[in-house]
Every structure is written in C-alpha cells, then in structure tokens.
Image (tube, rainbow, N blue to C red):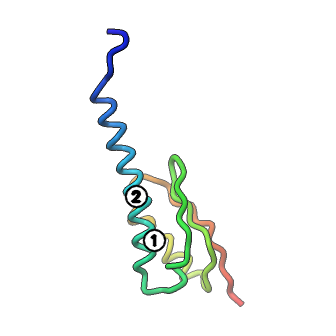
Amino acid sequence: MAGTIDNAAIELSAELSAAESCAYTSAQLALARSPIYALRQLIVAQTDESLVLSGTVGSYYEKQQAQEIVRSSAGSREVINQIAVNDL
C-alpha cells in the first residue's frame, strides 16, 4: 500500500544507527582508559563505514596498540589508522 510506513525498517535503521554510534563511543572510551598517555590524546572520527584514528604517538608499538584497541570496539566497521609516529 502506497504511503504506508514500514515500522520494521524504521526500527532496523534505528538499531543500526545505535550500533554504529556505540562502536564510535566504545572506541573513544577504550582509548581514554588506556594506561598509555599518548593513546588518550588520539582522535577517533566516524565515517559511514569506518572509524578513523588520527594524532601522534611516540612509537610504532603505540600506533599498533591504538589500532587494536579500536578494532576490538569497531564491530564490522573498518579501522583506518592515520596516526603519525614521532620517533625522534
């Protein structure tokens, strides 16, 4: 019937949006709780299909740690690691 609202589709869309928001929030909280200070300073951005990490850390180990922390929260989203390493 034309003009009817598909409540199931609306509910599914709301659930997906909540799950996406949850992945983003979980990633931010996970980094904020890190014992590594540099990881607490990183930025997490959200796109339609991914979580993007940015900022600067002091080693490649810290860069990888941040990526793995976020990956554990990302669900089905891709994690894009744009963190710079300042290894002076």
Count of numbered tags: 2
Looking at this view, name the residue that lies furthest to the top. Answer: 1
85 vs 47: above or below = below
- Residue 23: which numbered mark, if any? 2
Q: Residue at x 66, y 75 (%)?
A: 84
- Residue 55: which numbered mark, if any? none
Q: Quadrant of residue 26?
A: bottom left
Q: What's under tag 2, amino acid-wise? A: Ala
Q: Position of residue 56 (x, y in %)?
A: 63, 78
Which residue is the site of mark 1?
Answer: 68
Q: Quadrant of the N terminus?
A: top left
Q: Residues within 10 Å of mark 1 (few under 14, many from 20)?
A: few
Residue closest to the eye, 81 or 18: 18
Please give left or right for residue 6 compared with residue 32 in the image: left
Please give left or right for residue 12 compared with residue 28 in the image: left
- Secondary structure under tag 2 reads helix
First in sequence, mark 1 or 2: give its number: 2
Looking at this view, name the residue that lies furthest to the bottom. Answer: 88
Please give left or right for residue 40 compared with residue 76 in the image: right
85 vs 1: above or below = below
Q: Residues within 10 Å of mark 2 (few under 14, many from 20)?
A: many
Q: Residue at x 33, y 30 (%)?
A: 9
Q: Position of residue 29 (x, y in %)?
A: 40, 70
Q: Residue at x 43, y 66 (%)?
A: 27
Nearest to the eye among marks 1 and 2: give it. Answer: 2
Image marks 1 and 2: residues in contact by CB distance under 8 Å:
no
Looking at this view, name the residue that lies furthest to the right. Answer: 88
Q: Position of residue 42 (x, y in %)?
A: 55, 74
Q: Quadrant of residue 88?
A: bottom right
Q: Residue at x 27, y 29 (%)?
A: 8
- Secondary structure under tag 1 reads helix
